[in-house]
Amino acid sequence: MVSDEYEKTLEAFVLAKNFLTEQVELGFDEVYTQVKTEKSTTLNDFYRQIKDCKKCHLYRTRTNFVFGAGNPEAKLMLIGEAPGREEDLEGAPFVGAAGKLLDKMLAAINFKREDIFIANILKCRPPENRDPQPDEIEACKPYLLQQIKLIQPKIICALGRISAQVLLQTKSALGQLRGKFHDFNGIKFLVTYHPAALLRYQQYKRPAWEDLKLLRREYDNLVHQ
């Protein structure tokens, strides 16, 4: 007859094995050990683990590794494409002209940056702000997935076509993806225009406003239910 102590030890071994396998699949060179601590500390530990990343060639041209910023307890997570020039210089997401517009968009639906967490598909700026390449996405995406896992948001909002297509694993156009909620591993997932696109194309502002109102309604339903 197997003792309770043996069963507990076996269960702990299986959990540890599964965790180590998951870390390898995420692409980490070093095992990231989760401990029972505050999410803020956990995110900080994770940042320290990956901030010197050299998994793709973009590390050679970056000024700063742009991890992301915001509330580690956020119920809403915004995900963009990649850092631009200003973001690369300051080491924070959405701090240029697009960032200022994003702040106005958030304020219009009663959010502040302190309420949410903002990240990108890539942590380093692509040269000349070009689109991320497949190998860069493959190298960096595991970091974003781990951030999502640590933060555990109730809603994710993808800002722009590329972040939406990467996370939803689709080639559908942004116009086909926006205006409705999708499922991302059990998390409500909304797609809208990137603020940089709104600066260039005024005609996108009205549908973007509709997306924002939809986001706020769903957020209130989920958080206050």
Image: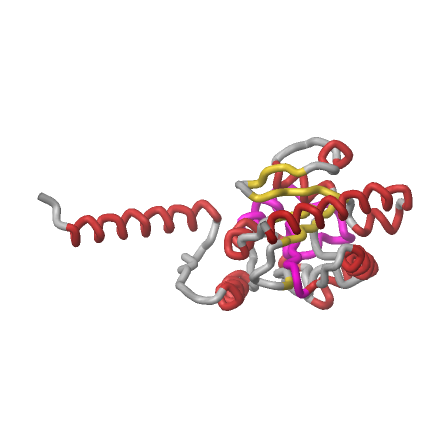
Task: State how the image is colored.
Answer: secondary structure
Magenta region includes residue 139:
yes
Residue 11, given in percent of the width and then of the height, sits at 26, 48
Q: Is residue 142 left or right of residue 198?
A: left
Task: Name the one closer to the observer, 47 or 220.
Answer: 220
Q: Residue furthest left?
A: 1
Q: Can you say whether 88 is above or below 158 in the image?
A: below
Task: Name the one closer to the observer, 93 or 70.
Answer: 70
Residue 147, given in percent of the width and then of the height, sits at 55, 55
x 60%, y 48%: residue: 222
Task: Name the one closer to the observer, 87 or 222.
Answer: 222
Q: Is residue 93 left or right of residue 169?
A: right
x 51%, y 56%: residue: 150
x 63%, y 47%: residue: 221
Residue 152, given in percent of the width and then of the height, sits at 53, 53
x 83%, y 41%: residue: 207
Residue 223, given in percent of the width and then of the height, sits at 60, 53
Q: Is residue 27 left or right of residue 184?
A: left
Magenta region includes residue 52:
no
Q: Residue furthest right?
A: 202
Magenta residues span 114-142
